[in-house]
Image (cartoon, helix red, strand yellow):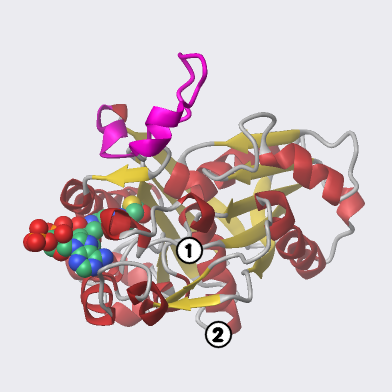
Amino acid sequence: MYKSKIAGIGANVPENVITNFDLEKLMDTSNEWILERTGIHERRFITQPTGAAELALPACIKAVKNAGINKSDIDLIIVATLTPEHQCPGTSSFLQVLLELPGVPTLDIRVQCSGFIYGLSIADQFIKTGQYKNILLIGVEVQSVGLDLSTEGRDLSVLFGDGAGAAVISRSYNDSAILSTHLFGDGRYAKDLWVEAPVGYQNPRISAKMLEEGKQYPKMNGKHVFKHAIVRFPEVVRTALKANNWTIDDVDIVIPHQANQRIIEAIAKRLELPLEKVYSNIHKYGNTTAASIPLAIYDALNEGKIKNGDNVILAAFGSGFTWASAAVRW
Ligand code: ACO
């Protein structure tokens, strides 16, 4: 058995900054409401039509460079997104073309906010068995064009932003390693955070009536999501601690999916961790779903909050419901 590690990280967000004050012009909301409930100051929205693959490309190039490999060394491309440019095929096919890597296998995964950790786990298994040496893993979302930016959709649309994060997962020859991954799901709650249409079992998959009714927009039972998130996040962190015989004091930093600052604060409180040990950059990007963890790792590294040898726990919870954690020695 081999070991895998996160060998390189890259990020890319659209330049266009949308502040809470910009949203005030589109819907009945306020900077105070958004800040108090979510901790978000601003997020990024694309301006030109930009597909998920296109947004991800610069992040991938940075991650490959940061890993010190050539893109021709990549054995597999995994993309986690809930906002692919087309229903079929997946974003990874379009990204493979942009990366000019014909023949490299492409895999899309659809587990929303937990996508990056699920992808990390898949990459880890392929590397452990020796099948692959370098895997490009991307979390990317182009959420903005799919949001109801009217007052009707305000509970959800103020939360989300666009962005991309990429990681190269490689065979490790030193102490740096992905030590464990744990994945969970409970589809009974699928409709608590979902996008109903297009619907796969009717022709046409979306009708004018459905569009009128706003079925193409994500819908959320916010209170229910919150209630589950603040239980599942600490639980899945504790699962990682137990698997590695760590106590919470062994952890240098927890990088949670950036769902909402109130959820991040609840995680810190329930784990009895000082807030400085639970990384947050949600104030500047909002919730970027599958992109949020690699974007957070990228920023935490640049801010010197993750150093070589650190024990890092990644944790996610989101639509599905799905939740997951990974313990990483940096
Ligand atoms: N601006 C102003 N008012 C708003 C907005 C808004 N953007 N959205 C909702 N309101 C109003 C509501 O209409 C309601 O008004 P009413 O009292 O007249 O009916 C009032 O504010 C309170 O609404 P609640 O839904 O009770 O607000 P709550 O305090 O529950 O906060 C929130 C809503 C922030 C969505 C909260 O439920 C939450 O944090 N949920 C977790 C969901 C989450 O973070 N999801 C992220 C995606 S999933 C993930 O990544 C894990």
The residue segment tinted magenta is: 188-213
In the depicted structure, whether residue 264 falls above or below residue 186: below
**In terms of depth relative to the viewer, which is nearer, 100 or 307?**
100
The x, y position of residue 208, in whole percent, is 45, 30
Answer whether residue 125 is visible to the viewer in this image. Answer: no
Q: Closer to the camera, 217 or 74?
A: 217
* Residue to which mark 1 is pinned: 161
Residue 123 placement: quadrant: top right
Q: Which residue is mark 2?
A: 304
> For residue 130, what is the image quadrant?
top right
**Gap between marks 2 and 1, in whole Å?**
25 Å
Of helix, strand and loop, which one carries label 1? loop
Q: Residues within 10 Å of mark 1 (few under 14, many from 20)?
A: many
> Residue at 25% across / 27% down in the picture?
188
Question: 17 left or right of 12?
Answer: left
- Location of residue 176 with respect to 118 vertically, above or below: below
